Amino acid sequence: MGRSQAESAPEQLFAGIDLASGNHGGTTTMRIVHVITRLILGGAQENTLLTVEDLQHQYHDEVTLITGPAEGPEGDLFERARKQELKVEVMSELVRPIRPWTDLRAYWKLRSAIRRLKPDVVHTHSSKAGILGRAAAWHKRVPAVVHTIHGMPFGAFESPLKNRLYITLERWAAYRCHAIVSVCDAMTQQALAAGVGQPEQFLTVYSGMDTDAFLNPRRTREEVRRELGLADDEVAFATVARLFELKGHDDIVAVAAAALKANPKVRFVWIGDGVLRDRLIADLQARGIRHAFLLTGLVPPDRIPALLAGVDAVIHPSLREGLARVLPQALLVGRPVISYDVDGAREVVLPETGILLQPRDLPGLETAILRLADDPSLRSTMGQEGRRRFADQFRHETMTRQLRSLYERLLDVPGSCR
């Protein structure tokens, strides 16, 4: 099958997809396979699971989620999938690290699964699953092959060798799908700048979530603060992320002592767990600031709205992220955000809703923390503006309607393999 499959009537692919309302036309049941590397607690995984839930329960599609094992300390979403009665197939060979022989076995098993399931649509997520899944789906002539970019596997903070490898693979895989969904406009711009895909293949669909849970948290701010041990006059900054490389926890540690000296009432709440936990705690103790940090460890996703409601602002100093879900989540709760200007952050962190910094701008990070800590009126104004702007844009129902409409348009394009 040649390049023409991905280029068939490109100007028609996204015609009729109303990105404001997500309206779609047909109601025909589809057979859909989603493929992702790990079903851990994470933004890409929650996005994918919500999509699968909506497709199955609202559109009554026949959906199968293929995933690798949930390795690591981050926790997983398998119990939630079970409660939602989703069809999940775990493929032990579909692992996150690059392992050539294991990856080859995963590719053959994906081909076998696609042959057995006979899907109308294969939708892949994350780089490893995206490369292997698109190759398998394209070889089996699946009528509609879609890939979502949740975050680039290459960038300024990766090694040149790894960047060259992933750019080459992503360029190759882009020829083996009909559409590429970006969770923010920045992902499309970065992909095209690296020579990945063609402009007509891309569509931005913001990552959906249960916005009502954040607009109306189940627990009061006072209850959550008592649970965390926060005093009424303490100003708490939450960070929701795995304790992992490139997530920026080290940068917070680096500026915390000076911030605490200027305002001893500042506190930091880290929500999440990961392989760096012990090292980070040791660093806090060595600096004499352990008392100012509250580590919740792993928490189920349904606790995040209340925890965000219990703090005063959010810091997200990640160095690589598609569009971190915690940024709109914090704004929906009514909390301002501090973020590095990476990937899609600037699409929600506006001068009216938060403070955007250049990556690794430690003096700027300290200043931003103190600015928000010292000005409750500014925190309130920014948070309320975020609620006003983004309540509808990030609803999971909106996301799924847009994706479902995309599938329908792809399946109707003349010249597809259907």
Image (cartoon, rainbow, N blue to C red):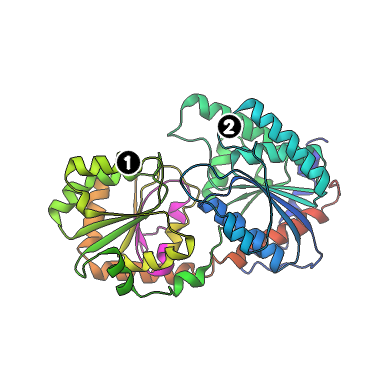
Which residue is more in the foreground, 89 or 62?
Answer: 89
Q: Look at the numbered disc 2 and give the secondary structure of its residue.
A: helix
Numbered disc 1: secondary structure:
helix
On screen, residue 237 versus residue 306, left or right, reads left
Examine the rendering and report whether any part of residue 169 can be seen.
Answer: yes
Residue 16 image offset from top left, x and y in percent: 73, 63
Q: Is residue 418 left or right of residue 241?
A: right
Determine the residue positioned at 51% across, 35% down. 154
Disc sitting over residue 278 in the figure: 1
Residue 229 figure quarter? bottom left
230 or 189, nearer to the observer: 230
Amino acid type indicated by mark 2: Ile
Which residue is at a point 46% across and 56% down the rendered structure image?
A: 347
Q: Amino acid at mark 1?
A: Asp
In reply to whether residue 223 is colored magenta, the answer given is no
Residue 361 visible to an observer of this rendering: no
Q: Which image quadrant is residue 96 in?
A: top right
Mark 2 crowdedness (10 Å alpha carbons): few <14, some 14-19, many ≥20: some
Q: Where is residue 111 drawn, in percent x and y?
A: 77, 38
Please state the horizontal and vertical placement of residue 264, each as a whole percent of the image. 15, 57
Per the model, the C-alpha gap separating discs 1 and 2 is 34 Å
For the point 49% across and 50% down, which residue is it? 75
Extreme residue in the left direction: 261
Q: Earlier in the sequence, mark 1 or mark 2?
A: 2
Tell me the quadrant of the picture where the N terminus can be found: top right
Residue 167: image tag = 2
Front-most of residues 230 and 44? 230
Q: Is residue 141 above or below residue 409?
A: above
Confirm whether the magenta stretch covers residue 343.
Answer: yes
The residue range painted magenta reads: 330-355
Q: What is the total number of numbered labels drawn onto the structure image?
A: 2
- Residue 271: name its quadrant: bottom left
